[in-house]
Structures are given as C-alpha cells and as structure tokens.
Image (cartoon, helix red, strand yellow):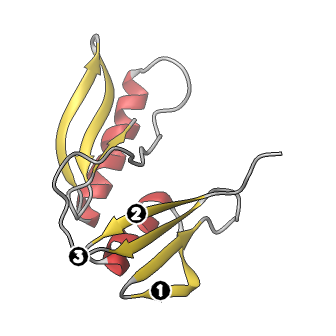
Amino acid sequence: MATNWTIGRDAADPPSLARFWAAALGYVIEPGFDSPDNTSIIDPDDELPAIGFLRVPEPKTAKNRLHIDIRVAGPGERSPESAVRMRAKAAALVELGATLVREDFYGDQLGHIVMLDPEGNEFCVG
C-alpha cells in the first residue's frame, strides 16, 4: 500500500502563491490552513497530494531542485493538438501571474513550455 504524502513549498507570500497554484491545478484552499505563514491547497476530489506553502525569510537564490509540472498535452506522441493545449494552458497561467520563459521542442513538435510561477520558481507545461 502506498503512503499518503504532501509536497511542502517555501514561499515569500504563502497565501498568494497558494492561490496561484490552486487556480493552475484546479485545487482549493484547505479549510483551516490559510494563514500568512502557512497555506495549503488540496485536490477537491481528495485523490491527489496536498501542497503546503510555508513562509521563509530568505529569497530564492538558485534553480529549484523539485518542481511541479502541469500535464495537458495528453498521452503518447506530441502533436499539433497537444501544442494547442499546452499553449492555451500557458496563456491562462500568464493571466494568473506566471511568466513564459521558452518553448522547447522534440524535433519539430512542441515538447513543453518552461515557465516561472509568481515567485520565480521554474515549472513546465507539457
């Protein structure tokens, strides 16, 4: 049997970053865990891991070693349709406060889109 787990994320502003990721992933703020120093988001269907955002005093100084990637391309080989889904999701995330960094290709097909969340943490849309 697998062990239930949660991802913990450092943040300068936990409530703000939690709200970005909740909107990006279709999660909701966890009742009782929404304070200036500690905000958690959960899958509303209670099937996927929770993500906790904890206030830390120091700023981000290097590439994060663990990050969340968003998968919208669909299974299998990349296609023009998967590129449309990835670009649409990336555009929606920019509206939420993310920054588009670059598009990476596998041959002639869009493989993934590198982005930064509102606090400058790297992630990909694939």
- CB atoms at circles 1 and 2 under 8 Å apart? no
> Around disc 1, counting alpha carbons within 10 Å, would you say few (fewer than 14), some (14 to 19), or many (20 or more)?
some
Q: Earlier in the sequence, mark 1 or mark 3?
A: 1
Residue at numbered disc 2: 9
Look at label 1 and name its amino acid. Asp
Residue at (73% x, 52% y) in the render: 3
Q: Secondary structure at mark 1?
A: strand
Q: Quadrant of the N terminus?
A: top right
Residue at numbered disc 3: 57
Pair 1/3: label in front: 3
- Cα separation, mark 1 vs mark 3, equals 18 Å
> Around disc 3, counting alpha carbons within 10 Å, would you say few (fewer than 14), some (14 to 19), or many (20 or more)?
few
Residue at numbered disc 1: 34
- Relative to residue 29, is residue 80 drawn left or right? left
Look at label 2 and name its amino acid. Arg
Mark drawn on residue 115:
none
Q: Dividing the picture into quarters, in which one does residue 124 lie?
A: top left
